[in-house]
Image (cartoon, helix red, strand yellow):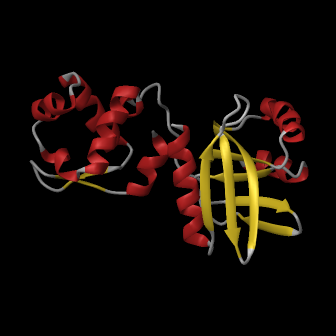
Amino acid sequence: MEENIIYAALQNFENQANVKWDWKPAHIPELDGRLILTFEGHKLTFNVEVKTELRHHQLPDLQHLAKRHAPLMIVAYRIFPKIKEELRHLNIAYLEANGNIFFKEKGTYICIDTQPPLPRINTDRNRAFTKTGLRVVFQFLLAEEFINLPYREIAERLAVGLGNINYVMTGLKDMGFIVQLDKKRYKMQNKKSYWING
């Protein structure tokens, strides 16, 4: 899930700004990775902590993490407005999966807050984003024709339970990621968001 959030956030940010990026997984337990941003002749490196959502009670821990591993950037699926305001006040960089970003580092300042928040996901009730569900979603992304195969054939090809296919399809339909063209055919939409929700 963390890598899905990272790559969706970076792609959405790249769509808004002329920026190149390089993401490397972390080699220490406290962090999730290292991000290098290059734009307008500047190269900035951030240590990264990935979250699905941020809560107010997490801020003190993030402050300590920022002191130990400066400069720190929080990458999250979504960040509530009041939390973003506090992060800016603390001068802790952040990047949301929708591409909104803030950082002030080495004389470079950027703040983009124009993208609407992505829909909140309840993974407890949506079986499309369980570990098994993600295998199915990932295959749909790799080969979209899978989405129109019989459920039994999908299950056999991916070596998952037949019931899981129904849960995944229902979950994706509920979230608007799959649209039904007719009685037998489906089409995927909002593909960029798939990389976020896993």
Residue closest to the eye, 180 or 49: 49
Q: Give the residue drawn at x 85%, y 61%.
A: 105
Q: Can residue 79 be seen in this view?
A: no
- The answer to whether 3 is drawn above or below residue 15 in the figure is above
Q: Can residue 118 be seen in this view?
A: yes
User: Which residue occupies the extreme bottom position in the image?
Assistant: 40
Give how far across and how far down residue 85 sits, in percent: 82, 52
Q: Give the residue drawn at x 70%, y 38%.
A: 54
Give how far across and how far down residue 52 sits, in percent: 61, 38
Give how far across and how far down residue 164 sits, in percent: 26, 26
Q: Give the residue drawn at x 55%, y 62%.
A: 12
Q: Is residue 69 left or right of residue 5?
A: right
Quadrant in the picture for residue 132: top left
- The answer to whether 175 is drawn above or below residue 95 in the figure is above
In the picture, the quarter occupied by the C terminus is top left
Q: In this view, does 174 lie to the left or right of 52?
A: left
Q: Give the residue drawn at x 76%, y 71%.
A: 42
Give how far across and how far down residue 94 sits, in percent: 73, 51
